[in-house]
Amino acid sequence: MNGRYLIVLGTSLIIIGLIITSFINFYYRSSILTGHIIAEDVKKLARIFNTIDRQCRIIGFDYDKNPINFLNVEKFSGSEIGSMNLAYPDKWDGPYLFDNLTVQSIEYMIVATDNGYFITPGDGVALPNGKVIGKDIVFDRKSDIAQMMYDKTQLYYGGRPLATQMIEYKNDAVSTDIANLEE
C-alpha cells in the first residue's frame, strides 16, 4: 500500500513539474514572440508610411498620439484620412493593408514629438520587458523616443527596437509645400 502512494505521489509531482515548466516556457516564448512581432510590425508600418509620403506627401497629424487604424481604406474624400493630413490625397493607392496591424488587440500609433513622428505600440500594450505603454512608458511632445528605442528598460528588447522614427518633418518644409500648393 505504501509503495502505491509513493508511485501516485511521484507521478503527481512529475505532472505538476511538467505543467509548471510548460507555463514558464509559454510565458518566456510569448515575450520573445511579442517582441519579434512588434519589431516587425513597426518596420512594416514605417515602409507603408514612407510609401504614402512619397505618393501623397504627408503634411502632418491632428494629435500628439494618433491611432493607425486607416490603412485598410481604399478611397476617401477630402485631404484627411484618419488623423493624417495629405497634400495630394488623390494619389492615395490604398488599401495598404487588408487589416490594420494590432498587438494584444491594440492598434499601433504615431506619436508626434519635437524630434519627429514615431511609430510605437499603442497605449495599453504590455512590452516583453514588463513595461506598459501609457502607464510605465508615457509619450508626449517632449519624449525622446529615439533614445528610448535603444534602452532595454524602455523600447528595446532582444536586440531590436520596438518603435521606429517615421518621417522627420520640418515646419518650414511643410509650410513651403503648402505655399507651393496654393500657387
Image (cartoon, rainbow, N blue to C red):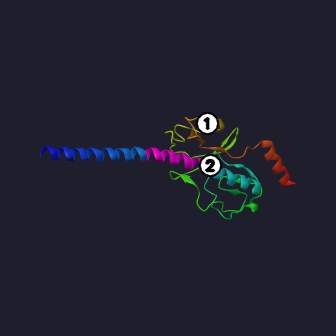
At label 1, the amino acid type is: Met
In the image, is residue 39 above or below residue 144?
below
SS for callout 2: helix
Q: Cα distance, mark 1 to mark 2? A: 15 Å
In the image, is residue 95 above or below residue 182?
below
Q: Quadrant of the C terminus?
A: bottom right
Q: Which residue is mark 2?
A: 42
Q: Residue furthest left?
A: 1
In the image, is residue 75 above or below residue 103?
below
Q: Residue at x 68, y 52 (%)?
A: 47
Q: Name the residue nearer the viewer: 81 or 23.
A: 23
At label 2, the amino acid type is: Val
Pick whichever of labels 1 and 2 is earlier in the sequence: 2
Q: Are marks 1 and 2 in contact (CB under 8 Å)?
A: no
Q: Name the residue nearer the viewer: 132 or 36.
A: 36
In the image, is residue 114 above or below residue 39?
above
Q: Where, by quadrant of the figure, is residue 152 drawn?
A: top right
SS for callout 1: helix
Instruction: Judge the density around disc 2: few (<14), some (14-19), many (≥20) Cα neighbours within 10 Å.
Output: many
Residue 134 among those drawn in magenta: no
Give the extent of the magenta segment: 26-41
Q: Residue furthest right?
A: 183
Magenta highlight: main SS: helix
Instruction: Judge the density around disc 1: few (<14), some (14-19), many (≥20) Cα neighbours within 10 Å.
Output: some
Residue 170: % across, % down: 77, 42
Q: Name the residue nearer the viewer: 4 or 125.
A: 4
Residue 37 among those drawn in magenta: yes
Residue 31: % across, % down: 49, 45
Circle on res. 148:
1
Please state if 12 lies on the left or on the right of 174 as rendered. left
